[in-house]
């Protein structure tokens, strides 16, 4: 028998919650607290489900019946009312910019404003695309740890364990940005720290035997390929900077008078300006290079256009051409060669070597002491 508005209004709480039915699945749930909530009971594929319509008196009896009738119409069309309600909520939240995809885009824009390197921005964009394929359109408040783990497992299944870990970290960065912006309450990736397979760290191949390194340098001196490639390898060995920093070096950064290469923070992995002292041998190579490329922007322009630096594969390809496999030597390996041989020589303080490699010491006080004891005050470089 249908209930009346007066009956609903006069319902009193009891020791336990209880239901009072209207008809065709609609009922009001009276809670111990005295609050009253409209519910609609229905079945989908034989399973009983409940649709929460709203609390009385904010939702009147007539409004509750209208909501029940609308839900019944959805069921007649094969639509689950609860799923339709969630989708409607997603659409509304999407319009407010609270989906993972939109918040991720805002996070990426923030990184651009902060002057993050192109490599960092490219990696962020790549990781966000991976995440967006699975849950980009979902409201960020509905994305759970199990849902994220499902995405990470897809990456793991391909054997890309390192990528899975980096993807988890990047998704976590977006969530922390959302928390700071008041769009989410927690970062669900925190619970996944120990859920992924730990990748085996593979160090880049490097020659650390002095005689073998000397043989490599003689082969570089006699390299019969592009002269710019030869000079790039020689400067890699001499200055111990990252291959990307060498490739992207610009003439405006070279101070010939003071023999210093000033690499701006936006190009550095640690996001700090880095001053590299230039020995006479490096100056001689730069003079040779300037006669070839001095009219352009880059020290090592691409063969196709002077507006871009040489390809990131050029230096490694030259090593392969000289007969060195990827398991023997890499362009990045010159840094490990420098670090190992410099430390073994006993000529310099270990902290000075780390500073030459642009490794940032977390203890700022220690950094200050290193700067006073191991470096020149003008250039911040090693005293050779």
Image (spheres, grey):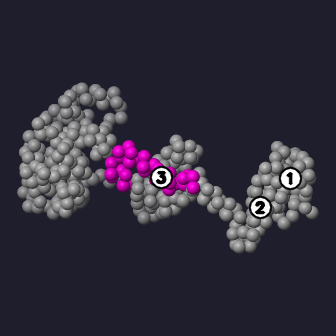
Q: Give the image location of residue 187, x and y in percent.
A: 54, 47
> In front of the other: label 3 or label 2?
2
* Residue assigned mark 3: 104
Q: Residues within 10 Å of mark 2 (few under 14, many from 20)?
A: many
In the image, is residue 364 above or below residue 147?
above
315 to the left or right of 172 = left
Q: Disc number at residue 18?
A: 1
Please state which of residues 176 and 165 is positioned toward the viewer in this rendering. Answer: 176
Q: Could you tell me if residue 231 is visible in this image?
A: no
Q: Give the image location of residue 12, x and y in percent.
A: 90, 46
Q: Residue at x 59, y 54 (%)?
A: 93
Please state which of residues 203 and 238 is positioned toward the viewer in this rendering. Answer: 238
Q: In the rendered structure, does residue 30 fall within the stretch colored magenta?
A: no
Q: Is mark 2 on a helix, strand or loop?
A: helix
Query: Closer to the N terminus: mark 1 or mark 3?
Result: 1
Q: What stretch is highlighted in magenta?
A: 95-123
Query: Closer to the N terminus: mark 3 or mark 2?
Result: 2
Q: Give the image location of residue 56, x and y in percent.
A: 81, 50
Q: Do tag 2 and tag 1 residues touch (Cβ < 8 Å)?
A: no
Q: What element carries label 3?
A: helix
Number of callouts: 3
């Amino acid at each position: 028998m249908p209930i009346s508005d007066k009956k609903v209004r006069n319902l009193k709480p009891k020791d336990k919650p209880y239901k009072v039915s209207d008809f065709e699945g609609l009922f009001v749930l009276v809670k111990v607290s005295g609050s009253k909530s409209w519910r609609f009971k229905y079945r989908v594929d034989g399973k009983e489900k409940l649709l929460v319509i709203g609390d009385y008196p904010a939702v009147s009896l007539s409004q509750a019946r209208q909501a029940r009738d609308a839900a019944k119409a959805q069921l007649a069309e094969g639509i689950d009312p609860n799923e339709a309600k969630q989708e409607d909520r997603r659409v509304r939240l999407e319009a407010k910019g609270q989906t993972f995809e939109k918040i991720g885009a805002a996070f990426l824009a923030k990184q651009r404003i902060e002057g993050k390197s192109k490599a960092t921005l490219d990696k962020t964009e790549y990781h966000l695309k991976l995440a967006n394929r699975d849950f980009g359109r979902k409201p960020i408040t509905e994305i759970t740890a199990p849902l994220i783990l499902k995405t990470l497992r897809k990456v793991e299944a391909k054997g890309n364990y390192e990528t899975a870990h980096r993807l988890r970290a990047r998704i976590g960065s977006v969530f922390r940005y959302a928390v700071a912006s008041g769009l989410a309450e927690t970062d669900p990736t925190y619970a996944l720290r120990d859920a992924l397979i730990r990748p085996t760290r593979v160090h880049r191949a490097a020659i650390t035997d002095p005689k073998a390194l000397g043989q490599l340098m003689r082969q570089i001196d006699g390299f019969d390929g592009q002269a710019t490639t030869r000079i790039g390898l020689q400067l890699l060995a001499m200055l111990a900077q990252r291959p990307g920093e060498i490739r992207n070096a610009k003439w405006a950064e070279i101070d010939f008078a003071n023999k210093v290469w000033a690499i701006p923070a936006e190009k550095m992995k640690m996001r700090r300006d880095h001053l590299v002292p230039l020995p006479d041998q490096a100056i001689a190579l730069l003079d040779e290079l300037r006669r070839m490329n001095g009219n352009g922007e880059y020290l090592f322009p691409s063969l196709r256009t002077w507006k871009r630096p040489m390809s990131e594969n050029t230096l490694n390809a030259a090593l392969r051409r000289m007969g060195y496999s990827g398991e023997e030597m890499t362009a990045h390996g010159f840094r490990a060669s420098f670090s190992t041989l410099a430390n073994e020589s006993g000529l310099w303080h270990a902290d000075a070597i780390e500073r030459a490699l642009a490794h940032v010491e977390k203890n700022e006080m220690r950094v200050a002491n290193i700067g006073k004891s191991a470096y020149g005050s003008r250039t911040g470089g090693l005293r050779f």
